[in-house]
Image (cartoon, rainbow, N blue to C red):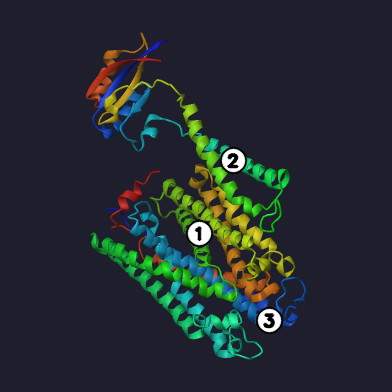
Amino acid sequence: MTNKKYVLGVFDDEEVLLHAIPNVRAAGTKIHECYTPFPIHGIDDAMGIERSRLPIAAFFLGCCGLAFALWLQIYTLGYDWPMIIGGKPNIALPAFIPVSFELTVFFTAHGMVLTFLIISGLYPKTNTQVMDPRSTDDKFIMAIEVKEGKTDMVQLSDLLRTNGAVEVNEKEVVS
Amino acid sequence: MIAEERLIIPKKISNRFLMMIGLGLVLLVAGIVLMMIAGPAHHDAHGAAAATGHHATTWYERFLANLWLNNVYFTGIAIVGVFFTAVQYVAYAGWSVLIKRVLEGLGYYLPVGGVIMLLVFLLPIIFTGHNPLFHWTDHSLYEIDGPNYDPIIAGKSGFLNIPFYTIRLVLYFASWIFFAWWLRKQSVAEDLNGGLTFYDKSIRISAMFLVVFGVTSSLSAWDWVLSIDTHWFSTMFGWYVFASWFITGLAATTLTVIILKQNGYLKMVNANHLHDLGKFTFAFSIFWTYIWFSQFMLIWYANMPEEVTYFRERMGGYEDHYTWILFTNLFVNFVFPFLVLMTRDAKRQMIMLKLVCVVVLFGHWLDFYLMIMPGTLRGDSGFGLIELGTALTFLGIFLNRFTKGLTEASLVPVNHPFLEESIHHHV
């Protein structure tokens, strides 16, 4: 078990935080994460977070769903237990389209949720550390990882305060 | 204060539209002359779907069918411009303000469309007694004990009769043109005077128009397209035609925005606005497919003779005359836009959007071809000089009216209350 230490800059206003981010980054400080009560438009770009690759996963999950749906219907209705329904052929593709559509959506939706949980490391019993509970209420938190011996705490604190942080705290997180 | 942006169409370009009309007319006349020399096409009356009492198609019928096809198609694009403007007002939308003048410009074709529609419907009736496009205009169908008496069509005569049809046609266009003009008037007055009064009034006008359009869009689809296949009916049809019109109008809007942008206009439109337009084009391609399939599957599954004839004609009927068009239609209007516009990047790049818009515009022309031709020309339709000439002529007229609409006012609605929001639009 290693403990990680973070410096938390507490902001009162999302606009102040949004303007502070490029300044902090320009000073050469790597921002670990920002915690805010609501999504802030443009914060991804400001923090330099790349676009999610989840849509690519979604496409392939959808393909899996479509393939599974077609296999299921063609195999069960065409080969395993052929039945004549409404005088149509056993493998009647137009009739399969609604089910194929539904299963494509089903696989995509559930698969995306699972993919998201896995890539975010959110397994069952994961102990998620809340940096500052006030970030679920009215405060905007910017967390910066402290590297022992490398980070100048006074300088970092000054940097955050000059950019509008109302408080600068430290927090140790068990990881 | 944001500066106005005036579109100036060089004389060379506007002459090109006139040349388009001229060339179209020449091709059209050439096509008609060739068809007259060759004599009417002879359709062999075998095959499962061969209609009884069928006669050879003349150039005159083919010409009328083409006029009707192109006019329905371009009128649809025009009215969707007005419809989408109204939707933006009612939804309090901000993003679309910068492209709003393009939508308004589309509506300028409506008066021309109305006149052509009325003439193409009425002139054949005045001169020959009935309109060959619409089987139900033949009055011998209604003579009880007559050799042509058709009890099904006679039963529909309360709705499908020439005076009522003409009144409806005039009413659709009158109401559409009136609302297009009224909305446009507010928009232009807002440019000059500013303030919120014009915006508030536009919302009220839009709400009224949407109610009117909700009824007239379905009714006009029944009148102009569904009544061609007089015996057949489909409760999905109003939506089907509307979906086709809507995606065509969106593609036309997107294409115009890109072309204007590439020529140095609409400077404040950026990838975010294109992204939204791309999403609309993507989404409503799927919507159209959904409607198409809903109509198809119910009819295919129930397999009732009076309903299924429609698809028998288009799939396998007339010796597979229309089969390839039906599958091409599904491919270019669904598979292609669906796969090409799926990624975020494709919706933000002009080249991809442009490609899809052109394909979709052509694809939905084919869609209307597939709605109108089998019922009018049976197995004798084709793609020849008449089709090319008529389409070119209509395109020329449409572009002439459309660019007139675009040049008449600033491309940027300078006093629109949501202009600032649209400039800073970000997705």
Name the residue beneath numbered marker 3.
B58
Q: Amino acid at mark 1?
A: Ile
Q: What percent of the width, then of the height, locates residue B111?
A: 44, 75
Q: What percent of the width, then of the height, locates residue A119?
A: 49, 27
Residue for point 40% across, 76% down: B174
The part of the image, by quadrant, that contains residue B136 is: bottom right
Q: Are marks 1 and 2 on the same chain?
A: no
Task: Report the side of B412 relative to A124 (left or right).
Answer: left
Q: Tell whether label 3 touches label 1 (CB within 8 Å).
A: no
Task: Report the side of A61 relative to A35 (left or right).
Answer: right
Question: Disc 2: which chain?
Answer: A
What is the CA distance from the residue labelled 2 to the residue labelled 3?
A: 51 Å
Q: Secondary structure at mark 2?
A: helix
**1 vs 2, front mark:** 2
Residue for point 58% across, 87% down: B142
Q: What percent of the width, then of the height, locates residue B225?
A: 55, 72
Q: Amino acid at mark 2?
A: Gly
Label 1 vs 3, first from the N-terminus: 3
Task: Choose between B287 and A155: the one closer to the eye.
Answer: B287
**2 vs 3, front mark:** 2
Name the residue beneath numbered marker 2.
A65
Which numbered circle lies on residue B409? none
Q: Amino acid at mark 3?
A: Thr
Residue for point 28% across, 58% down: B415
Q: Tell whether label 3 touches label 2 (CB within 8 Å).
A: no
Task: Choose between B241 and B389: the one closer to the eye.
Answer: B241
Which numbered circle lies on residue B247? 1
Task: Report the side of B6 relative to B309 (left or right).
Answer: left
